Amino acid sequence: MIILILGISFVPVVSASGPPSIPNVFEGNLLSDGANAPVGTIISAYIDSKLVGSNSIAEVGKYELAVSGTEKDNGKKIIFKLSNAESEPVSVAYKHGASPMKLDMSFKGDFIPPIIESFSASPMYILNDGKDCSAIWVKASDGYSGVASVTIDLSPIGGEVVSLNPENGGTYTYNLNSTLAGDFKFALTATDSFGNKATNSISITVLKKEELTTRYGGADKAFSAEEIKNLVNDNNISSGIKYAILNIYFADGWDKI
């Protein structure tokens, strides 16, 4: 009986969840449009259109990528991509737990992201009445495939990602307004025709009428003629804020004119 109990105690416990995923690792030379892929280029792998691996190139013309499939993916084709471009023909199937494999690959397409050359928000301070607005201006370029779109993420003020309006000379514009007040940072994204992206961010402050006196009225919470003059000439402040401040200033009599 003792021997039987001891024997049972040495039986290993097998996890009900099965063996852990063991990724296929690929490495080798990497060409993009006939040249060594630059540092920072993102290479990705897909099985059945599902992303199963992604890595940034750390050495010019070289890559290493772990493809994390499952046993159910055994024998399925792996598709490798730089941006939205697939590699030139390679036939590789996923093998669960396989040893690292050397695989040289080349891609044709545009793998250089666009450039956000400059951007601005004018004015930077607007009123939260939903009508006062700031004109967003972005200049973006892409020397290979051209800029497909420039977007701004309005989620900080409860909105969505929207496209800026294309203008002449590679510029894009959008009139931003808000009913929410606060200091906000909005993500700008330029995307070219191959899916390469460049990002930056722009900041805008949205103010309530009731905080204008505290913000612009100085220590005495009142406006002087000199302060009014400076505010009127400040291009960073919207016309909506200026009119609201003038209404406060003249509230006790128009003889201040």
Image (cartoon, rainbow, N blue to C red):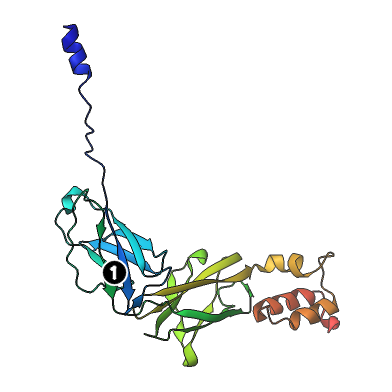
Amino acid on which the number 1 mark rests in the picture: Lys
**Residue 188 at what x, y percent from top left?**
49, 73
Confirm whether residue 92 shows in the render. yes
Q: Check the picture and name the quadrant holding the C terminus.
A: bottom right
Tag count: 1
User: Horizontal placement of 201 versus 72: left or right?
Assistant: right
State the residue in front, 55 or 166: 55
Q: Residue at x 63, y 73 (%)?
A: 127
Q: Residue at x 36, y 70 (%)?
A: 61
Give residue 135's position: percent from left, percent from top.
56, 81
* Category of crowding for the residue at label 1, using alpha-carbon neighbours closer than 10 angstroms: few (below 14), some (14–19), many (at least 20): some
User: Residue 232: horizontal and vertical position, in percent?
Assistant: 75, 82
For residue 232, above or below residue 128: below
Residue 181 seen: no
Q: Secondary structure at mark 1?
A: strand
Q: Is residue 149 shown left or right of residue 207? A: left
- Disc 1 designates what residue? 81
The answer to whether residue 180 is left or right of residue 78 is: right
46 relative position to 253: left or right: left
Q: Residue at x 85, y 79 (%)?
A: 226
Q: Is residue 57 above or below residue 106?
A: above
- Residue 81 location in percent, x, y? 29, 69
Say which quadrant the N terminus sits in. Answer: top left
Taking depth in this image into account, of 44 and 183 the one nearest to the observer is 44
Within the image, what quadrant is residue 102 found in? bottom left
Which residue is the extreme one toward the bottom?
168
Of 73 and 222, the residue lying toward us = 73
Nearer to the camera, 134 or 256 = 134
Residue at the outermost left position: 75
